[in-house]
Image: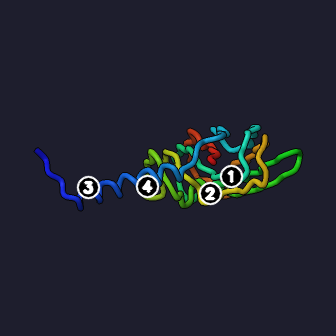
Amino acid sequence: MTHRTPRLDTALALSLLSVLLLLSGCGKAVGRLGFTAEGAQSAAVPLAAGDVDFWTDISLDFEQPAALSYHIELEQAGAVVARADCDPLGQLNIKIGWAESSFGNSRSLAGSGKMACSAHLPKAGLTNVRATLAFSTKPTTLTFKKADLVLKQ
């Protein structure tokens, strides 16, 4: 028979609560724009009023230096209501299923991560999401599998 102390039960409960809070803070995926190369994509997505978080679902192998960004516009009723520029190669606040390796100038990334950018929608409704993915500094070699933009609320 296993005997747990009240202190262990409290620590276990706090750990489980922390995991649940972290997962609930990730939001629910409400839209995705798929990229298998640089370019532009768009989609009409029903969004709630409030914050929209931007995630990347990425799989790239490349030689550094490299700089990649999404330029995102959210349009409602024919007017742009929010813009964001996001760096999928930069600091990702939360990572899920993440694998990364570096050797010399070679870098390999795969997984999903919350980028350090967001937008705020003043009203709920059908929103045209337009995004352009482009390198401002192109890598010397590149294997581009995907770099999907994921919207979460």
The residue carrying mark 4 is 102
One can see residue 22 in this view: yes
Residue at the spot of label 2: 87
* Viewer-side residue, 56 vs 106: 56
Instruction: Specify few, some or many for label 1: CA neighbours under 10 Å numbering under 14, 14-19, or 20 or more.
Output: many
Q: Give the class, few, some or many, for how many residues have Cα within 10 Å of label 2's Cα (few <14, many ≥20).
A: some
Pointer 2 or 1: first along the chain: 1
**Residue sitting farthest toward the front:** 6
SS at mark 4 in the image: strand
- C-alpha span from label 4 to label 3: 40 Å
Mark in front: 3 vs 1: 3
Q: Nearer the viewer, mark 1 or mark 4?
A: 1
Q: Residues within 10 Å of mark 4 (few under 14, many from 20)?
A: few
Q: Which element carries disc 1, helix, strand or loop?
A: strand
Q: Amino acid at mark 1?
A: Tyr
Tell whether label 1 touches label 3 (CB within 8 Å): no
Q: Amino acid at mark 2?
A: Asp
Name the N-terminal-most of marks 1 and 4. Answer: 1
Residue designated by label 3: 9
Marks 1 and 4 sit apart, C-alpha to C-alpha, by 23 Å
Q: Amino acid at mark 4?
A: Ser
